[in-house]
Image: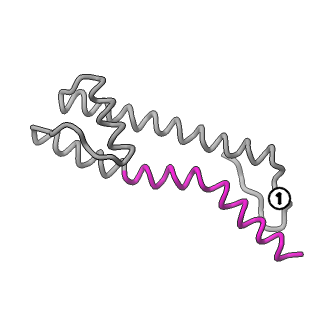
Amino acid sequence: MYEYERRGEKLLPMRQFLSRVAQQGGYVLVAMAVALAIGMSGYHWINRLPWIDSFFEASMILGGMGPIHEPHTTAAKLFDGVYALFAGLFFIGASGALLAPFLHRMIHLFHLEKDR
């Protein structure tokens, strides 16, 4: 992880800033792959869906679209509920991680202008 520049420091050059954005995006992609794998595994082993349907179901939940297949067992219903809550919090965290470099740069720029 990058350490962000402090208030008295110069604005990060564009090349380094873009590198920071790409690294944050990479972290989010890895986290998304892990979250998708967790969902796929649960839907496959607990809900007894084929792998392609498990991928589709987990993708729809992570994307905020909602479930496709109806769960039939108590374990499947519990997994669906917990995974849906996890997906909602994951979306908030991933959004924050992707926006952090941009928001920090904007606030740092405001501080540089204020100090002039």
For residue 100, what is the image quadrant? bottom right
Rendered view: 61 above or below 116: above
**Along the horizontal axis of the image, is 96 left or right of 6?**
left
Label the magenta part by its dominant secondary structure.
Answer: helix
**Along the horizontal axis of the image, is 8 left or right of 103?**
right
Residue at 71% from the left image edge and 63% from the top image edge: 106
The one nearer the camera, 5 or 65, is 65
Rendered view: 92 above or below 83: below
For residue 25, what is the image quadrant? top right
Rendered view: 86 above or below 73: below
Residue farthest to the left, as pictured: 73
Which amino acid does the dot numbered 1 rest on? Leu
Estimate the x, y position of residue 93 in percent, counting from the top left.
48, 53
Q: Which residues are magenta?
A: 88-116
Estimate the x, y position of residue 62 in percent, counting from the top left.
37, 43
Rendered view: 56 above or below 17: above
Residue at 75% from the left image edge and 65% from the top image edge: 108
Q: Is residue 82 magenta?
A: no
Residue at 66% from the left image edge and 45% from the top image edge: 1
Residue under circle 1? 11
Estimate the x, y position of residue 49 in percent, counting from the top left.
21, 27
Residue at 18% from the left image edge and 45% from the top image edge: 78
Secondary element at tag 1: loop
